[in-house]
Amino acid sequence: MKRLFIALMVSVLSLGSLHAAEAGWLTDYDKALKQAAAEKKPVVINFTGSDWCGWCIRLDKEVFSQQEFVNYAKDNVVLVKLDFPRKKPLSEAEKKKNEALAQKFGVRGFPTIVVLDPKGKQLGELGYQKGGAAKWIESLEKVTKK
């Protein structure tokens, strides 16, 4: 029974990761800007501490891993995830790029979600908010439709 429970929990956790992967998060800012310009879509940059930041983990679980958000993102935005983990290793080059971008956008806490137009001009910022994917998407659309 214990093995069945563990297997079930691993499966459930894996599904959340699959949804996040399905959403198409990029880690290369320059590549994301090129894609956004080509597709004429806004860019959503998620500055996160994925393995230690409680609000980041909640945002991922309640919004970014939800099928509603995954479906929305595929058609409407280019996603970039810039991670600042404590346990998960990142290359020195990726750390430096992420830190430089955090400084460029004035990130002072996590999660910070920076929204850019397809040309790279900052439209606004978002963070965690209650209400799940639908409410978060509504807030994102207010920023992108300005």
Image (cartoon, rainbow, N blue to C red):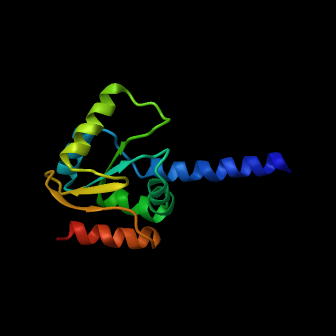
Residue at 42% across, 52% down: 23
Please provide percent x and percent y for residue 88. 48, 35
Residue 42 visible, this angle? no
Q: Residue at x 34, y 40 (%)?
A: 27
* Relative horizontal placement of residue 71, taking residue 42 as reference (left or right): right
Figure quadrant of the C terminus: bottom left
> Is 131 placed above or below 125 here?
below
Q: Farthest top residue?
A: 92
**What residue is rendered at 33% in x and 33% in y?**
95
Query: Which image quadrant is residue 92 in?
Result: top left
Number of numbered markers: 0
> Hey, which quadrant is residue 40 in on the image?
bottom left
Residue 8: horizontal and vertical position, in percent? 72, 51
User: How far from the left and from the top, in percent, is residue 66?
Assistant: 49, 61
Give the quarter of the image for residue 31. top left
Q: Nearer the viewer, residue 7 or 22?
A: 7
Whether residue 25 sits left or right of residue 60 in the image: it is: left
Res. 84 visible in picture? yes
User: Which residue is pictured at 43% across the width and 40% down the height?
Assistant: 85
Viewer-side residue, 63 vs 18: 63
Q: Residue furthest right?
A: 1
Residue 87, position in %: x, y? 50, 35
